[in-house]
Structures are given as C-alpha cells and as structure tokens.
Amino acid sequence: MSELDELRQRRLRELQMMQGQSRRDVLQEQITAQQQDQQINLIMRQIMTPEARERLANIRLARPDFARQVEIMLIQLYQAGRLKELNDQTFKALLTKISSTKRETTIRMG
C-alpha cells in the first residue's frame, strides 16, 4: 500500500469517527430535550388545573414557540413563589395580559 493510500485510509477512519461522534451528540441533545420536556410537563401538572393545561395544549398546537415562552414564564413565577395554582380563569386573564403587551403589526397595501 502506498503512502497516499495509507493517508486516505486514515482520513476515512477519522471522518467515520467524527460522523459517529456527531450522531452521538445529536442523540444526547434529543435525550436532554426530552428530559427538559418531561420536567416542564411535571411542573405544569403541579401548578395548573386540567382545564388550564388543556388551554395551554391548544395554544401549543397553534403557536408552539409562544406556548414554550408561557411555560417558562409560569415556571419562573412558580419558583419565585408568586404562583401557587393556576386555574383556567386565571390563566385566561394572564394570557390576555401577555397578549395586550405585544405590539400590533398591520400591513397596509396600496
């Protein structure tokens, strides 16, 4: 085997090892994300009534990013001791308050 062939083989093995490492990294990230989701769901079950959780699930279907932001905000409020239990009525009021702070964007044609 020539020196060039040996270099090619070594480089090929290095690339295969790097590819295997990236697959492991992706799997580890997926596992971490699943664990975070489980922890968030557990906390949501502790602080929200079933009706409020159902409302949050509906929001998640329409706007997943917004739902995640709401979950993070609720967890922060809970950890700060400013939230004990969240029923559907209170959750609706909170959502209204959050939505009213957003700026409205309109597009005018013509």
Image (cartoon, rainbow, N blue to C red):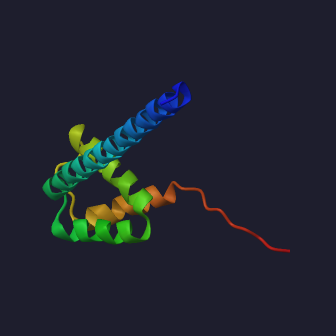
**Left or right of 86 on screen, residue 61:** right
Which residue does the image show at 41% across and 35% down from the upper left? 13
**Left or right of 79 on screen, residue 15:** right
Name the spot of residue 12 as percent of width and height, x first: 46, 37
Residue located farthest toward the top when viewing the structure as drawn: 3
Which residue does the image show at 20% across and 53% down from the upper left? 38
Q: Is residue 2 above or below residue 50?
A: above
Q: Is residue 82 above or below residue 105?
A: above
Q: Compare residues 90 and 60 and report the one nearer the observer.
A: 60
- How many labels, in total? 0
Q: Is residue 99 above or below residue 6?
A: below
**Left or right of 3 on screen, residue 55:** left
- Which quarter of the figure is the C terminus placed in? bottom right
Q: Compare residues 50 and 7 and report the one nearer the observer.
A: 7
Q: Compare residues 15 and 59 and report the one nearer the observer.
A: 15
Name the spot of residue 20 as percent of width and height, x first: 35, 42
Which residue does the image show at 43% across and 57% down from the upper left? 65
Q: Compare residues 67 and 85 and report the one nearer the observer.
A: 67
Name the spot of residue 94 as percent of width and height, x first: 35, 58
Residue 54 figure quarter: bottom left
Residue 85 visible at all: no
Residue 34 visible at all: yes
Which residue does the image show at 17% across and 68% down from the upper left? 50
Name the spot of residue 88 as percent of width and height, x first: 25, 67
